[in-house]
Image (tube, rainbow, N blue to C red):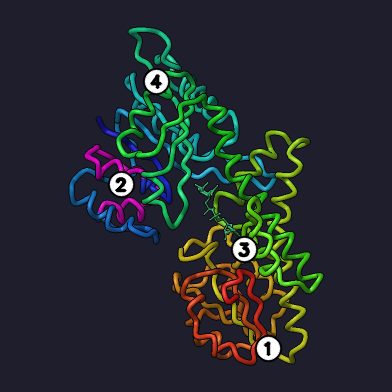
Amino acid sequence: GRVAVIGLGYIGLPTAVVLATRGVEVVGVDVNVATVEAVSEGRLPFVEPDLAAAVSGAVAMGNLTATLETPESDAFIIAVPTPFNTDHTADLSFVRAAVEQVAPRLRGGEVIVLESTSPPGTTAQVSQWLAQLRPDLTLPHEVEGVPDIHVAHCPERVLPGRIMIEMVTNDRVIGGITRRCAERAAEIYRVFCQGKLLLSDAASAEMAKLVENAYRDVNIAFANELSVIGDALHLDVWEVIRLANHHPRVNILSPGPGVGGHCIAVDPWFIVGAAPELARLVRTAREINDGKPHHVAEQVINTAGRFRTPTIACLGMAYKANIDDLRESPAVEVIETLADALPEVDIAVAEPYVNSLPDKLAQHRNITLERTAAAVDRADIVVVLVDHDQFRSLNRSLLAGKVVYDTRGVWR
Ligand code: SAJ
């Protein structure tokens, strides 16, 4: 049968590709003309290890095509963004738009899987929207012999930078509106998933996904709080964590300039939104991690105060190591804060994965994008914001005589 994957982003495109390379006829759908053109020509619209070769292969095999219009299909996988509004409630408008595209294509018997990370109740909402848009189809399937629609939630869990590996090896949670919905959805994932398929109900699947990312957020917040305490007490937090982690039951994560990306910095808010009075630790962790870029900028501004007109090198803009993704990046926030607070100071930014500054940094006259060695060479203060391998392997003699503020501990 044919599978339509709606949303060709970091999740939808790799999912489309793994299905297509295993012989499934896949149509990728996106609202972005440039994305559709790129994928149709077998090109990748963003950087992700191993994905480029897989996309061109799948397109060359003839199993993957891309279009702006959702076609009739046997299964629909919705992988669109679920951002949050300024009040931290989820913006489900992209999910709603996808449902509106799918509804007129239904003939009965199809499977609709929501992969987008969503607040509890969203899958049930999708099912209700479909029922309203297509009252002629039974939802969910229950009645024998009547055309039926199977709605399930199968949250993605892949790690950017390792997507093509984790897509295949991770276990998958598949929560159906009914058991039958989950079973039907599992048939799709069985095609490529070597991990376990964990069948459950839709609301549990939604919450499990949010909990995974909140778990990580809370643990990173602990490390970040330790680093702020370390700065105040003039202690090397990396040394403290290294020692503590030798305990057999302690495994503290790494502090950094904050938490970025479009998952961990977002998803815990959906838990807070669902239980605002109760989700205290989850909320505090978000606040600690969101406050970290400001703390880093403050430390650097204090250091800059010791110079007349220093040059500051900022290494990295991506939200984490070895990728080009600047979404919700704490590094970008630090750089922006520095540029605002120190308008007379030259800020040389190095980011090997990106060849132009994002708009909000390009507006600042005192920021320039440079090669790593050049930026470091002319700087008085070097701030490490991303642990790219290229920075780790920097010739350390370049740092002689400079003040280094290493938020990622790359040169320990
Ligand atoms: N970070 C730290 N210290 C650490 C680990 C991470 O500061 O010890 C920072 C990173 O630099 C980055 C942020 O946290 O700014 C998040 O990075 P990440 O690598 O922890 O996770 P993501 O956002 O790239 O992907 C996460 C993953 N979730 C979990 O590991 C529980 C991934 O499996 C999910 O699929 C993804 O979110 C998602 O899409 O939800």
Distance Cα–Cα, label 4 vs label 1? 63 Å
Asked whether 372 falls inside the magenta stretch, the response is no
Q: Give the camera-side residue of 264 and 28.
A: 264
Distance Cα–Cα, label 2 vs label 1? 48 Å
User: Which residue is found at the position 30% from the left and 52% from the top?
Assistant: 39
Query: Which mark is nearer the camera, 2 or 4?
Result: 2
User: What residue span does the magenta drawing correspond to?
Assistant: 15-40
- Indicate the position of residue 235 as horizontal and vertical percent values: 76, 72
Query: Which mark is nearer the camera, 4 or 3?
Result: 3
Residue denoted by label 2: 17
Instruction: Evaluate whether residue 84 shows in this view.
Output: no
Distance Cα–Cα, label 1 vs label 3? 22 Å
Residue denoted by label 1: 310
- Indicate the position of residue 25 as horizontal and vertical percent values: 24, 38
Distance Cα–Cα, label 3 vs label 2? 30 Å
Tell whether label 1 touches label 2 (CB within 8 Å): no
Mark 2 CB near ligand 1 (8 Å cut):
no
User: Which residue is found at the position 71% from the left and 72% from the top?
Assistant: 236
User: Which residue is found at the position 81% from the left and 70% from the top?
Assistant: 233
Mark 3 CB near ligand 1 (8 Å cut):
yes
Q: Give the camera-side residue of 236 and 346.
A: 236
Residue denoted by label 3: 330
User: Dot 4, crowdedness within 10 Å: few (<14), some or many (≥20)?
Assistant: many
Kind of residue sitting beneath label 4: Ile
Residue denoted by label 4: 149
Q: Quadrant of residue 281?
A: top right
Q: Which mark is residue 262?
A: none
Q: Earlier in the sequence, mark 4 or mark 3?
A: 4
Kind of residue sitting beneath label 2: Val
Q: Earlier in the sequence, mark 4 or mark 1?
A: 4
